[in-house]
């Protein structure tokens, strides 16, 4: 089958586009980058791709809230194009700032008449967190997480605290199989800071939409693709590949197998 094409959507302040491009190319995809203004001028271009990726960074300086300005652009200028893209059995991935964007744009958990059901707020530590974390994976329907049970990847964010408007919303996401990534504690214990680096409810590190074809996560899988990406590789031994590569490979294989 044809090699799937990935569109990496950039905005002012995006700074992880090169890393995610490398990860997808290593997984076997063809990658192209577009600035949000280019896609706004020609929304029909989106249909030329199989995977839409919103990478990390500080889009629009996070001046209003992390990912909010870019989310507003998606909602107001590209909603129809993205809806058509998603309904065509294609994939959407948001990492870190990209997760903040697609969550606030309603691509993961659609809002109800009272507004958004969930958001990503400031870390409870009150500071930017840059550290490696362990994740428990419950793939459910998620295309990206197929066959995975754990991941070790780094986080780097100031607003990664996943909060639902009501407790029942979090319970509903779990029951629906959408709470696919959770921060893991030591030796099976419930995680506390810094294992849960931002204070997220339910230790949520990432969620999928109901179809499993849209995934948002705060940690950076693209930063653990090569075996030498891991900070302890000289002590633990050189693995075949970094944990994060499997996520990108799953997305490619969705279209090639």
Image (cartoon, helix red, strand yellow):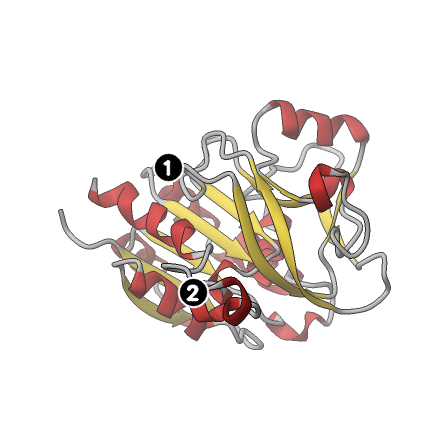
| Residue 185 at least partly seen | no
| Residue at figure coordinates x 64%, y 28% from the top left | 174
| Left or right of 34, for residue 172 | right
| Left or right of 18, for residue 129 | right
Query: Which mark, residue 238?
Result: 2
Q: How far apart are marks 2 and 1 (CA)?
A: 41 Å
| Left or right of 196, for residue 175 | left
Whole-percent x, y for residue 53 in the image: 43, 58
Instruction: Say which quarter of the image contains residue 197.
Output: bottom right
- Quick one: SS at disc 2? loop
Rendered view: 183 above or below 236: above
Whole-percent x, y for residue 164 in the image: 76, 39
Task: In this rendered view, identify the residue nearer to me: 227 or 108.
Answer: 227
Whole-percent x, y for residue 113 in the image: 71, 32
- Quick one: SS at disc 1? helix
Label 2 environment density (alpha carbons within 10 Å; few <14, some 14–19, many ≥20): some
Question: Between disc 2 and disc 1, whose residue precedes?
Answer: 1
| Residue 144 at least partly seen | yes
């Amino acid at each position: 089958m044809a090699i799937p094409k990935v569109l990496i959507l950039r905005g002012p302040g995006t700074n992880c586009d090169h890393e995610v491009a490398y990860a997808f190319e290593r997984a076997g995809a063809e990658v192209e980058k577009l600035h949000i203004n280019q896609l706004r001028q020609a929304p029909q271009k989106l249909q030329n791709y199989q995977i839409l990726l919103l990478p990390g960074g500080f889009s629009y300086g996070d001046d209003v809230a992390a990912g909010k300005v870019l989310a507003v652009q998606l909602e107001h200028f590209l909603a129809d194009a993205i809806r058509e893209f998603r309904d065509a059995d294609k994939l959407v991935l948001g990492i870190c700032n990209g997760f903040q964007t697609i969550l606030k744009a309603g691509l993961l958990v659609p809002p109800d008449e009272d507004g958004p059901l969930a958001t990503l707020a400031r870390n409870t530590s009150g500071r930017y967190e840059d550290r490696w974390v362990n994740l428990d994976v419950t793939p459910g329907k998620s295309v990206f997480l197929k066959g995975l049970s754990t991941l070790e990847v780094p986080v780097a964010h100031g607003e990664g605290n996943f909060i639902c408007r009501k407790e029942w919303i979090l319970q509903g996401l779990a029951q629906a199989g959408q709470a696919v990534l959770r921060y893991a504690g030591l030796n099976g214990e419930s995680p506390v800071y810094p294992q849960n680096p931002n204070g997220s409810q339910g230790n949520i590190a990432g969620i999928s939409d109901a179809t499993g074809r849209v995934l948002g996560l705060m940690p950076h899988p693209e930063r653990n693709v090569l075996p030498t990406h891991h900070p302890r590789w000289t002590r633990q031994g050189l693995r075949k590949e970094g944990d994060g590569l499997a996520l990108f490979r799953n997305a490619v294989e969705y279209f090639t197998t």
